[in-house]
Image: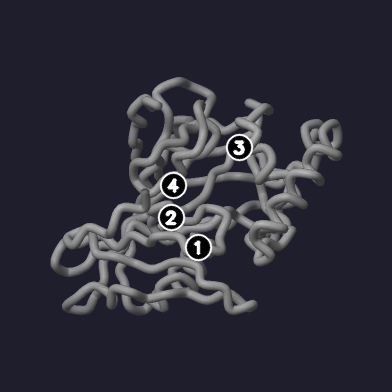
Amino acid sequence: MNFAAPRIEEIATIEFRLAPAPWPFASNRAQEIDAHWARLVRRNPHHYNGRVLLMRDVNVVATASGRRLEGRCFVAEYKAFLAWRDFGFPDASVSNVFAMAALRSAEGAFLLGEMGPTTANAGQIYFPAGTPEPDDLVGGRIDLEACVRRELREETGIGVDEVSFDTDWRAVLPRAAHSLHEDGAFGLLGEGPRGACGGVHRRRETTGARPPDRGLRHRRSRQEPHARFHSSLSPPRSAG
């Protein structure tokens, strides 16, 4: 399947505020969602139905201090999120926006992770990233900076004191307006026929002389393998 190439925009600020509201997809298709979840858990008992933050009204606006990525967010069950994804994104008003650490070593290599076999995206290639959770809310807004710092530490073992930060963000967006894009490039998901997911990158450069060791695996609290990481100068084995 062919995907339209995304556009990349420099973003000065990000503003996603919590706006609790029902999600008609989750309520109207609850039985289908539960059945789908049961099938997923039978195949992979490591799945956990936590809560994630999804977005509505995502837009890029010009301000005096630069371009701002903004929108509203709401809390959804993870099982509903996976069903929305696996059913082909039937609610086009919703987007999955997440932050990724585009980590670049002193030699110029970017660090990418191959998702572990027990995750929902096994074999996918990513920058260190994760869908925001309610714990990422601070004062009613999503703190994507803190989110990406946490994912960087959890997935690579690299602390914020070991990297330097760009001042701006780079948003990977679709060519079409009012829809975020899902594509295999830049570590984004490549699992749907139309846009429903966007990545916001903040580049980090390691202060050490070499990228982190290949073969690193992050383990969640239940000791499930999450990802192994590769330098982009030494391409990973094909996931397919």
The residue tagged 1 is 117
Tag 2 near tag 1, CB within 8 Å? yes
Query: Label 2 amino acid?
Result: Gly
How far is mark 3 from mark 2, CA to CA? 30 Å
How far is mark 1 from mark 4, CA to CA? 25 Å
Query: x%, y% of residue 231?
Result: 24, 64
What secondary structure is found at the residue carrying circle 4? strand
Q: Badge 4, how many Cα within 10 Å: few under 14, some, many 20+?
A: many
Q: Badge 2, how many Cα within 10 Å: few under 14, some, many 20+?
A: some
Query: Disc 4 or 3, which lies upstream in sequence?
Result: 3
Query: Disc 4 or 2, which lies upstream in sequence?
Result: 2
Query: x%, y% of residue 135?
Result: 68, 64
Tag 1 near tag 3, CB within 8 Å? no
- Scheme of colours in the image: one colour
Between residue 102 and residue 117, name the one nearer to us: 117
The residue tagged 4 is 200
Q: Which residue is located at x 59 percent, y 36 percent? A: 95
Foreground mark, 1 or 4? 1
The residue tagged 2 is 123
Q: Quadrant of residue 228?
A: bottom left
Looking at the rendered image, the quarter that the N terminus falls into is top left
Query: Label 3 amino acid?
Result: Gly
The residue tagged 3 is 71
Query: Disc 1 or 3, which lies upstream in sequence?
Result: 3
31 is higher (above) or lower (below) than 165: above
Query: Disc 3 or 2, which lies upstream in sequence?
Result: 3
